[in-house]
Image (spheres, grey):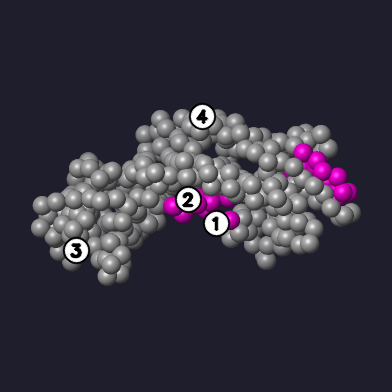
């Protein structure tokens, strides 16, 4: 999706991050005390990130392993493109190993570590559910002996495997294998930090903005032309030339693998966008692209450009509230 608007949000999320961190610091368990993360990077670059941690240990439990979770866009393929290490005066240096589905968290109710993280922390305030938690475990364990130890988790990730320019809030969480995301009288045994919007530039794919409310959203975020898709226009994001209209329609052009363009720009039931409630100002239409554009069995749709129009077809809104079309590229990954 190329549709994004920079609605006022970056300063707000910086403040919220500070508030979240302040709350976590008041707890007695594992704590992320800071994150050194660049504000921007280019597609294909290897980005270094440092997560500073402090772990007060209570009682005589363990040995346990340090668990680390990293929230990133699915399209970055972080499991294949990330190296995570740690260094601590108490534990020394070591590597964080990617956790497979065979290693289940003690208090996760049968979920895998990534699923447990998503259930507990969601997608970190991002607005498009095309994010994933990637989970790692330290190669050395530690005991709970009443001491506090500090350290750093070092991440090196090659960003933008999907070649998309991106705005996204990256997330970080730590806990230990003995407790997971739990709390008791001794404290809270985990810590999460979500950083302000990170900007990735230099790609040739669609612009994907996880941070800011969008005029249009296509669900699922990635699909092929043989999947049903739902396109939603959100008239509450910003005033547009269509703000006073009660009936909206989709005007779209398909680009096929054999170089053809097929336009469907009519004001009929086929293209009508239905308001989700009587006053929501959010309009949506669900369609099967292959049938919608009436392509042949030999053709596939590579991308779709589209506008939202009024009933007369005389007024249209495109990308960024302009007359440039929104763009959706059909791809599974």
Q: Are marks 4 and 2 in contact (CB under 8 Å)?
A: no
State which tag comes first along the sequence, 1 or 3. Answer: 1
Residue 333 lies, in percent from the top left, at 44, 47
Q: Which residues are magenta?
A: 121-150
Where disc 2 sits, the SS reads loop
Which residue is label 1 attached to? Answer: 122
User: Does residue 129 appear left or right of residue 225 in this picture?
Assistant: right
Along the viewing direction, whichever of 94 and 12 lies nearer the viewer: 12
User: Does residue 170 appear left or right of residue 214 in this picture?
Assistant: right
Please identify the quarter of the rendering in which residue 51 is found: top right
Residue at (65, 39) in percent of width and height: 34
Q: Residues within 10 Å of mark 4 (few under 14, many from 20)?
A: some
Residue 104 lies, in percent from the top left, at 70, 58
Distance between mark 2 and mark 3 Cα atoms: 29 Å
Which residue is label 2 attached to? Answer: 126
Distance between mark 4 and mark 2 Cα atoms: 22 Å
Residue at (64, 51) in percent of width and height: 23
State which tag comes first along the sequence, 2 or 3. Answer: 2
Which residue is label 3 attached to? Answer: 246
Distance between mark 4 and mark 3 Cα atoms: 46 Å
Q: Nearer the viewer, mark 1 or mark 3?
A: 3
Residue at (39, 56) in percent of width and height: 220
State which tag comes first along the sequence, 1 or 4. Answer: 4
Residue at (80, 47) in percent of width and height: 56
Residue 62 lies, in percent from the top left, at 85, 53
Distance between mark 1 and mark 3 Cα atoms: 34 Å
Please identify the quarter of the rendering in which residue 228 is found: bottom left
Where disc 3 sits, the SS reads loop
| Residue 45 numbered mark, or none | 4
Q: Is residue 277 above or below residue 252?
A: below
Q: Is residue 138 above or below residue 114?
A: above
């Amino acid at each position: 999706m190329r549709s994004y608007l920079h609605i006022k949000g970056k300063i707000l999320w910086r403040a919220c991050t500070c508030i979240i961190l302040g709350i976590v610091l008041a707890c007695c368990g594992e704590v992320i005390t800071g994150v050194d993360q660049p504000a921007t990077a280019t597609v294909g670059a290897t980005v270094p990130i440092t997560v500073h941690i402090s772990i007060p240990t209570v009682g005589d439990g363990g040995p346990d392993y340090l668990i680390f979770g990293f929230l990133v866009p699915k399209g970055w393929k972080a499991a294949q493109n990330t190296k995570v290490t740690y260094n601590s005066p108490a534990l020394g240096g070591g590597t964080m190993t990617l956790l497979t589905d065979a290693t289940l968290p003690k208090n996760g109710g049968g979920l895998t570590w990534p699923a447990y993280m998503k259930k507990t922390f969601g997608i970190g305030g991002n607005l498009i559910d095309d994010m994933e938690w990637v989970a790692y475990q330290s190669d050395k364990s530690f005991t709970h002996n009443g001491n506090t130890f500090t350290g750093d988790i070092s991440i090196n990730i090659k960003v933008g495997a999907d070649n998309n320019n991106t705005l996204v809030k990256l997330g970080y969480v730590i806990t230990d294998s003995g407790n997971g995301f739990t709390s008791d009288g001794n404290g809270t045994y985990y810590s999460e930090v979500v950083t302000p919007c990170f900007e990735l530039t230099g790609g040739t794919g669609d612009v994907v903005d996880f941070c800011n409310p969008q005029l249009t959203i296509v669900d699922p975020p990635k699909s092929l032309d043989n999947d049903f898709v739902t396109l939603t226009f959100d008239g509450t994001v910003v005033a547009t030339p269509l703000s006073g209209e009660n009936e909206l329609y989709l005007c779209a052009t398909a680009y096929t693998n054999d170089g053809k363009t097929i336009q469907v720009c009519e004001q009929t039931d086929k293209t009508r966008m239905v308001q989700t409630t009587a006053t929501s100002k959010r309009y949506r239409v669900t369609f099967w692209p292959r049938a919608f554009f009436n392509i042949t069995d030999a053709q596939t749709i590579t991308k779709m450009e589209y506008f939202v129009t009024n009933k007369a077809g005389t007024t249209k809104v495109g990308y960024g509230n302009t007359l440039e079309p929104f763009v959706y590229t059909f791809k599974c990954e």
